[in-house]
Image (cartoon, helix red, strand yellow):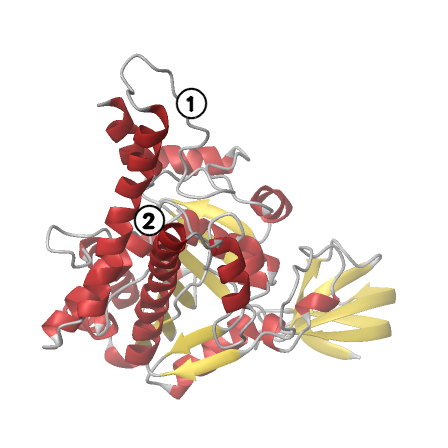
Amino acid sequence: MNFPCRIIPSMDVQNGWTVRHPCGRGLRLIVLTASAVPPMGAGLRFSFVVVSVVIITPMVRVAVIGSGYVGLVAAACFAELGHEVICVDNDARKIAVLERGETPIHEKFLPELLARHRGHRLRFSGSVKDATRASQAIFIAVGTPPSENGEADLSYVEAVSREIAQAIAAHPNEYRIVVEKSTVPVDTSQGVRRVMELNGAPTDQFDVASNPEFLREGTAVTDFLYPDRIVIGADSERCITLLKKIYEPLTDGSYYKNKNIIPEPDEVQIPARLIATSAKSAELIKHASNAFLAMKISFINAVAAVCESVGADVGQVREGMGADVRIGKRFLYPGVGYGGSCFPKDVKAFRAVAQHCGYDFRLLDEVMKINDEQRQRFIKKVRNALWILKGKRLAVLGLAFKGGTDDIRDSQAIPGCRDLSR
């Protein structure tokens, strides 16, 4: 069997090579004998006696811009699926930390994935342009913090889009897709496209898509690899095809047949379900989902207040409600209110989107009002129990916004501590 190819040593097949055709299709071969003959053209000509052939889904060259909770997890998980990944950040210190083998955030299974793929399928860089030139799919996972009026600040998204466009304009020899992974308002994909076109990217050499993340801090790796659903939003069949290819190991179930994979959590759907939509629909799915989950938290906190007033057990009420499959038990846990880097800003941003569209989303106002009042209800309970707080020592166990993470952004615990110290 003779054909032009290039040989890459295989680490997981004894006495074998990974053989890549010029078209990029991968074949993994276990070789009994092999003899080389002189080079021909741009490749090499080899002769093989082949014992077995395994067809491997071709990998995709991926860049992830941003190495925060979303970007770093996505980069590590894309590498776990077999893709070649470059994770980019403009913080040189963070890149140095990652290259040293350290993990800058607390996330279950993330250290294992970084150790497994760092220096092989996963590399780190400070250059958006270099990563763009080397990649077929560029995922934007930068911050979108809230502005004073509650709208999402998209300045980081715009800045990265400009750099990507300049890299594509300088090397317009390959089709690429630019994918929003950050949580952004509806129609951001059109804004990204306009910025890229204005900065010289040829319109026929790229598409913009939305691929929202549904990752919970603390379980983000398993959420990525064992998702409830994968949403891809694009207005081009060419773009959708490439996105489907990226997630194919999850949607065709091939990832789950490998050895040494991340352990399967309870109650997951295998293979993963993929939902293809327009870009605008995908953007709305993310904001609407987070707003709805925040609403469930505020609702059960309001129910807890009623339970206290009448002497009922909110735990029993929650159990009875959650047993209904239409409601479900998730996010029905009363507490001091939701926090973190997602729900507070996403509820405000979704309300701002509605206002721009001329709709007064009053339900979201009540969700935020109940959440703010819940912390004050907790402080009142403490004062009622201890009467005078001055001179008393109080211990607070945990400042993160929830268990399983070290993220203290918008944690209800921090203003709660301030209130108790006054």
- Write down the quadrant of residue 157 in the picture: bottom left
| Relative side of 155 to 83, left or right | left
- Regarding residue 273, the answer to whether it shows in the image is yes
On screen, 400 above or below 230?
A: above
Instruction: Give the secondary structure at mark 2.
Output: loop
- Amino acid under disc 1: Ala
- Disc number at residue 167? none
Q: Quadrant of the N terminus?
A: bottom right
On screen, 269 above or below 418?
A: below
Q: Which residue is mark 1?
A: 395
- Looking at the image, do the residues carrying marks 1 and 2 touch, with CB atoms under 8 Å apart? no
Residue 177, horizontal then vertical, whole percent: 37, 72
Q: Residue furthest front?
A: 310
Q: Residue at x 19, y 66 (%)?
A: 351
Q: Which residue is mark 2?
A: 341
* Label 1 to label 2: alpha-carbon separation: 25 Å
On screen, 231 above or below 394?
A: below
Residue 120, horizontal then vertical, whole percent: 60, 50
- Amino acid under disc 2: Ser
Q: Residue at x 33, y 57 (%)?
A: 302
Residue 189, horizontal then vertical, whole percent: 25, 72
| Relative side of 31 to 271, left or right | right
Residue 109, horizontal then vertical, whole percent: 60, 47
Please rate how many residues cluster around mark 1, counting C-alpha atoms within 10 Å: few if below 14, some from 14 to 19, many from 20. few
Most foreground residue, 224 or 155 = 224
Instruction: Give the secondary structure at mark 1.
Output: loop
Most foreground residue, 4 or 128 = 128
- Regarding residue 349, the answer to whether it shows in the image is no
Most foreground residue, 18 or 314 = 314
Q: Quadrant of the C terminus?
A: top left
Q: Residue at x 42, y 63 (%)?
A: 213
